[in-house]
Image (spheres, grey):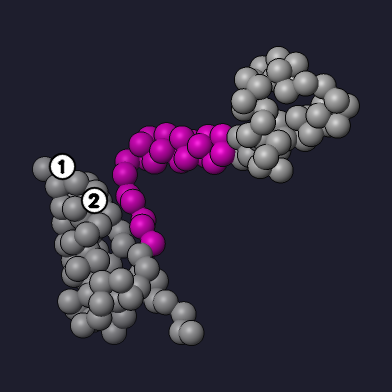
Amino acid sequence: MAKRKTYTARFELDKNGYWSVVTEVGSGKAAISDGQTLPKARRRIRQSIALLLDVDENSFDICEDVNLPRKAMTRLRRYQGAQQKLRQDSEEAAQAERAAAQVLAELGISRRDTGDLLGLSGARIQQVLNES
């Protein structure tokens, strides 16, 4: 199976609040589009690339490069990093929850008491144990 081509779309917010998008597609060609919202700009640049290359809109991937003022980019990256950490911490918590529920169940502790110890309902403990 052939590897899908990926194009980098550079998004910039203009002075009127519209997103302008430029994507170089090779051979000195560039797809250019815009949109009042990010979803609209994304849809339009995908259409523009597909028309320029005469290919199906779903036959390639787009990597987004959003260019905002430095302060906004710093805050955005900080938020994205915090979200990634939250996802990792949530997965670790779920694994710890399963492990604790399993060991307490192996000790013969009731679902209700296990839930009380873990701050969960007995029904949730049952779900956790069924997921393992």
Q: Amino acid at mark 1?
A: Gly
**Residue 54 lies in quadrant:** bottom left
- Which quarter of the figure is the C terminus placed in? top right
* Residue 118 visible in image: no
Q: Position of residue 126 (x, y in %)?
A: 67, 31
Which residue shows up at 41% across the image and 38% down it?
76
Magenta stretch contains residue 15: no
Residue 80 among those drawn in magenta: yes
- Mark 2 → mark 1, Cα distance in angstroms: 14 Å
* Magenta part, dominant SS: helix
Residue 92 in the figure: left or right of residue 55: right
Closest to the observer, 87 or 27: 87
The local secondary structure at tag 1 comes to loop
What segment carries the magenta color? 63-87
Residue depicted at 31% across the width and 44% down the height: 68
Where is residue 6 shown, x and y percent of the image? 39, 71
Local packing at callout 1 (Cα closer than 10 Å; few below 14, some 14-19, many 20+) is few
